[in-house]
Amino acid sequence: MAVYTEVTDEELNDFIGSYDVGRLLSFKGIAEGVENSNFLVHTDKASYILTLYEKRVNPDDLPYFLNLLQHLAAKGLSCPTPVPSRDGELLGTLAGRPAALVTFLDGMWVKRPKVDHCAELGRAMAELHLDGADYDGFRKNALDVSGWRPLFDQCGERSDTVHPGLGAEIASELDHVEKVWPRDLPGGVIHADLFPDNVFFLGNELSGLIDFYFACNDAFAYDIAICLNAWCFEQDMSFNVTKAKALLKGYAAVRPLSEAEYNALPTLCRGAALRFLLTRLYDWLSVPEGALVTPKDPLEYLKKLRFHQSISSTQAYGLER
Ligand SMILES: Nc1ncnc2c1ncn2[C@@H]1O[C@H](COP(=O)(O)OP(=O)(O)OP(=O)(O)O)[C@@H](O)[C@H]1O
Ligand SMILES: N[C@@H](CCO)C(=O)O
């Protein structure tokens, strides 16, 4: 992960002192994640997560994220709850970065998800979609189909240094998805980054969802597509239909999918694979000097994209309704 921004003991003591969370005992940078700087904070009252928001988080979006977490927690969804400061503020500033303190969630993420984990994830994602229905905030997806070409333009010819011909392959895929991208699908609040490392389990039971900093308003089935890519491919990049069926069944048991949503899945999966290929490619080409971060492999998502390019219908996935 990222510790992009170091925090001194004095800065932290002052910051924690502005919250009614007890006396600071210890804090340390967390070695997972690539987007923000996260620290585990122990006080004599409880454990917390301190997040300093980095480059990909627009500070203007933070009220949407933090109020959403409060809204979802109030609905009973297990997610981090922002801790208000003594002045009642959810958002502060620390070491020059926007910063928030959230509750610590018990559980561990699963490095090799099994079929049952996929079913649990599908169910929890559908509950999230339903719980967000009456959330009064709105945030356009900054990384929807309209955001991919500008991101690719920032990578430019350097793309081919990561893989020969990658630039041309991305340009051609962009032309395709921009033409056929489905509109008017059922939508609302989505997580948009529900990878295994953002889903906690205690034993085989899902215990919580974290990292809502790509949450936005978009098509529900696009969130499903992101999860099919993140949960249903094996290490050898083969697509596991059993896991995909379990994920969709778990989801549909809570929120049934429409015909249009099912039929859009192949295109949505291509777009979702392209989105993470592009953000990983951008990060791969622009790791800040000295940042403690391990960028994720863009080519993993090039392989997933190529798989979806070979698929023409949900039946080909073996996904019947
Ligand atoms: N509320 C929480 N409770 C417990 N652990 C947490 C919590 N929030 C974050 N973590 C820990 O910090 C790690 C990084 O958090 P997070 O995924 O939010 O960071 P990120 O930089 O946004 O990462 P990503 O690359 O997944 O976007 C998580 O994998 C988890 O180990
Ligand atoms: N979950 C993303 C990183 C955070 O956006 C990925 O694996 O590319």
Image (spheres, grey):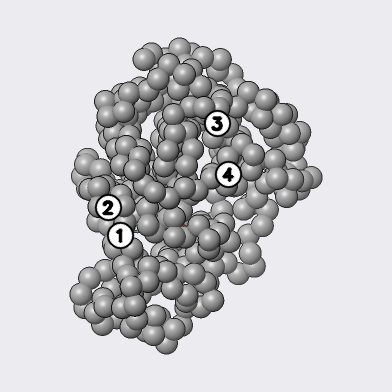
Q: Ligand 1 appears in which quadrant?
A: bottom left
- Label 4, label 2: how many angstroms apart (C-alpha)? 25 Å
Q: According to the image, label 1 marks what residue?
A: 81
Choose between 255 and 4: the one closer to the eye. 255
Q: According to the image, label 3 marks what residue?
A: 304
Choose between 134 and 126: the one closer to the eye. 134
Q: Secondary structure at mark 1?
A: loop
- Compared across the picture, whether 239 is left or right of 152 comes to left
Query: Looking at the image, do the residues carrying marks 2 and 1 touch, with CB atoms under 8 Å apart?
Result: yes
> Could you say which disc has been placed on residue 143 in the image?
4
Amino acid at pointer 4: Leu
Depicted 190 relative to depicted 122: above or below: below
Q: Secondary structure at mark 4?
A: loop
Q: Position of residue 292 (x, y in %)?
A: 53, 65
Q: Position of residue 316 (x, y in %)?
A: 48, 13
Q: Earlier in the sequence, mark 3 or mark 4?
A: 4
**Residue occupying the point 43% across, 16% down:** 259
Amino acid at pointer 1: Thr
